[in-house]
Image: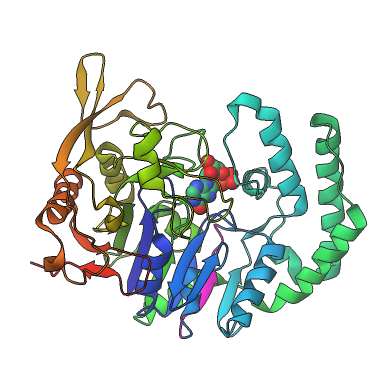
Amino acid sequence: MTLEIVVGTQWGDEGKGRIVDLLAAEAAVVARYNGGDNAGHTVKVGNQTFKLHLLPAGLIHPHAFGVLGNGMVVNPTSLQKEMEMLRAAGIEVNPQRMMISYAAHLITPGHKALDVAQELARGAGQIGTTGRGIGPAYTDKAARRGLRLLDMLDPQGFRQKMREHIRSVNMQLQVIYQAEPLEVEATAAEFEDFAVMLKPYIGDAGAKVAAALAAGQVVLAEGAQGTLLDLDQGTYPFVTSSSPTAPGALTGLGLGMQREAARVIGVTKSFQTRVGAGPFPTEVQGKAAERLRGTGANPWDEFGTTTGRPRRVGWLDGVLLRYAVRINGLTELMVTKLDVLSGLKTIPICIAYHSQGHEYKELPLGPADLSPFEPVYAELPGWQEDLTGARNWSDLPRNAQGYLDKITEISGVQISLASVGPERDQIVKREKN
Ligand code: IMP
């Protein structure tokens, strides 16, 4: 019985897609448990680059069974596009290899329109959402008026529910936000067609996952976004509306506490990035930022997979990393994009915060309000060598190993792997001591 959870330790975009791709080779079931098509997981296989937003990234492996868990919000338009994209690449997508939880909620054009209208109304206080309707879909879920995949099992009845939903959204759009209403009949008809298309995929995904675990198979739970975007544990209100953290994998897949210790893999970038608004104590600007971000010429430069927005960048924040270790119960760390740091003379890493004469190694009140804190940095010696050809731990220059050792010292968690480029084989694994 092995549940492996891959979780981002930062604000998303840690490079989880490629780690999932690696681990999925050994997994029988690959499952998404939170969020929707706000995620963007890039996987590069040979000369093909897959950008997946909604489907589990592990589905690229032909042997794996894909699950979309009850913790997700599913936009059928994006889902259909993604299924077709994989089929065009020769990857089978059918009900024999994929299931969507009946309890997952739907994202409609109404939710997307509300997301955009609500962001506009926030003015200077914008969260910088992806505009995918995530917040409004989870709002409807919590308000107990959401539309679920279960409702699609009766496509005609669902059409009527969609009419009522769009009418209610239109009231909000027109009265509160002075925005254009949506077309009721056309949207309802389109969603009836989606219901017919998706019906064979709808099932008890929690039971499917539990059965796989009981049979001794590996289930890989793919977290989207990251710890610091968690609705409860993140930099609220600059968060997403779901639970990307490891405990979210249990509620988001419909699993109970696992008796056997799960592998909880924290993926951390070797520096820090963020898309959208919100606190970011180690953020840098100017030349240093350009250096970390890249120019956008490469698909792995720091520009959003879902929105194309340039990401904010900064140095690795050890205080927030320690927090992520605690919140997720991480059992190991995997560090991505180590190659990007080559060529720097020294590399700052935040080891504590400073505020009004006090030094903090732990956050006194969680990460919601980071504004009073100044990062305290340790300056580590950099390395000049290109790392992209490294394949063994011993190929890494001494200072690169020293940087990884510092991450372990700060976090208290062993690093099992580091990535040194976007290709499948550009990784170094650490042999266990
Ligand atoms: P929402 O999830 O679209 O509501 O956006 C809320 C916040 O989460 C915004 O700051 C987004 O930029 C951020 N966000 C959502 N999904 C991702 C992701 O997959 N990677 C990085 N940031 C994300």
Task: Name the foreground residue: 424 vs 323.
Answer: 424
Q: Is residue 114 above or below residue 86?
A: above
Q: Is residue 293 above or below residue 82?
A: above
Q: Residue at x 82, y 67 (%)?
A: 192
| Residue 67 within the magenta-colored segment of the rendering | yes
Q: Residue furthest left?
A: 433
Task: Name the foreground residue: 299 vs 393.
Answer: 299
Q: Is residue 259 above or below residue 128?
A: below
Q: Is residue 242 visible?
A: no
Residue 321 place in picture, x, y as percent: 28, 44
- Count of picture labels: 0
- Tell whether 202 sits left or right of 267: right
Task: Name the foreground residue: 213 vs 297.
Answer: 297
Residue 162 place in picture, x, y as percent: 82, 56
Residue 328 place in picture, x, y as percent: 33, 50
Residue 368, image quadrant = top left
- Tell whether 296 sits left or right of 179: left
Q: Quadrant of the N terminus?
A: bottom left
Residue range in magenta is: 63-71
Q: Is residue 187 visible?
A: yes
Q: Residue furthest right?
A: 185
Q: Residue at x 83, y 57 (%)?
A: 161
Q: Residue at x 51, y 69 (%)?
A: 56
Residue 132 place in picture, x, y as percent: 65, 50
Task: Name the foreground residue: 156 vs 347.
Answer: 347
